[in-house]
Image (tube, helix red, strand yellow):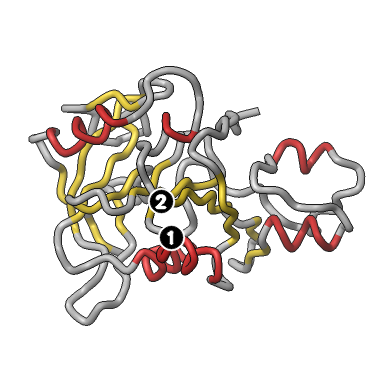
Amino acid sequence: MSPLRHEIDVRPAQAVAALLDATGERVTSVIPPGYEAYIRVLNPIQFRDGSVVSWTDAVLRSGVEPRAWMQWPELVAVDDVVLPDGGVEPDMGGPPVARATHLIEALRPDSGVHYFASWAGYATEISEPYVAFSPYQHEMVLYSGRLIDDGGAPLVPTTATGRVPMYWWPSDHRWLVGQDIHARSLIVGCTQTVARTILESEHLDAYPISSSDNVRGEEF
């Protein structure tokens, strides 16, 4: 885990917000346009003992064809999908620590400072200064920190409340991770090379998507 530094100078967050599509609910409203590839990474179904199962595995075991934009409420409502006994619905607004670790490994960040944004509305979260991010104009607080230690091992970013932030990006914007506060998945904008690494990871439940796809709300 890597505690983050709260930033008063919000210009790095303003730079990201200015790139987001302010109208509609497309992928480019969450992640800026212009990346070679866009990926949706699904948070796993969790069990009380700490183990997890991916959405894809659960759907395939039920004989149903998985798809990139499958939604948790839809899976619960489909008679043909048999969800694992004792499984708990995926977290909203942030990935589990283990999945965040594997995503960091796939992103291959350098040892420099990265930026992070977390919703100001979380209980006990720092609330200002903030920058409004589309598509819902949520008030986002800026943090900074590292994603790998001196030995290259992943450092999972956390705010003072212990939350993994909703947005992560390096200063050069070569990739960007983002999500809505109610999302049970992450969206990543990146190069084709990084996209292949994410899609080929046995630890990440990920699908290629298009920048023009609509992002449906997951707070049913």
Residue under the image location 91 percent in, 43 percent down: 79
Q: Position of residue 186 (x, y in %)?
A: 48, 47
Q: Position of residue 181 (x, y in %)?
A: 45, 34
Q: Nearer the viewer, residue 217 or 118?
A: 217
Tell me, yes or no, whether the two marked residues, 2 and 1, touch with CB atoms within 8 Å. yes
Q: Secondary structure at mark 1?
A: helix
Quadrant assignment, res 100 = bottom left
Q: Is residue 215 above or below residue 72?
A: above
- Say left or right for 53 vs 178: right
Q: Residues within 10 Å of mark 1 (few under 14, many from 20)?
A: few
x and y, in percent, of residue 187 in the image: 47, 46
Q: Secondary structure at mark 2?
A: loop
Residue drawn at (54%, 49%), measured in percent from left and top?
Answer: 40
Question: Residue lying farthest left?
Answer: 9
Residue at (34, 29) in percent of width and height: 20
In the picture provided, is 108 more to the left or to the right than 200?
left
Left/right placement of residue 13 relative to residue 123 reads left
**Residue sitting at x 24%, y 34%:** 141
Instruction: Read off the residue under disc 1.
Output: 192
Q: Which residue is mark 2?
A: 36
User: What residue type is disc 2 on?
Assistant: Glu
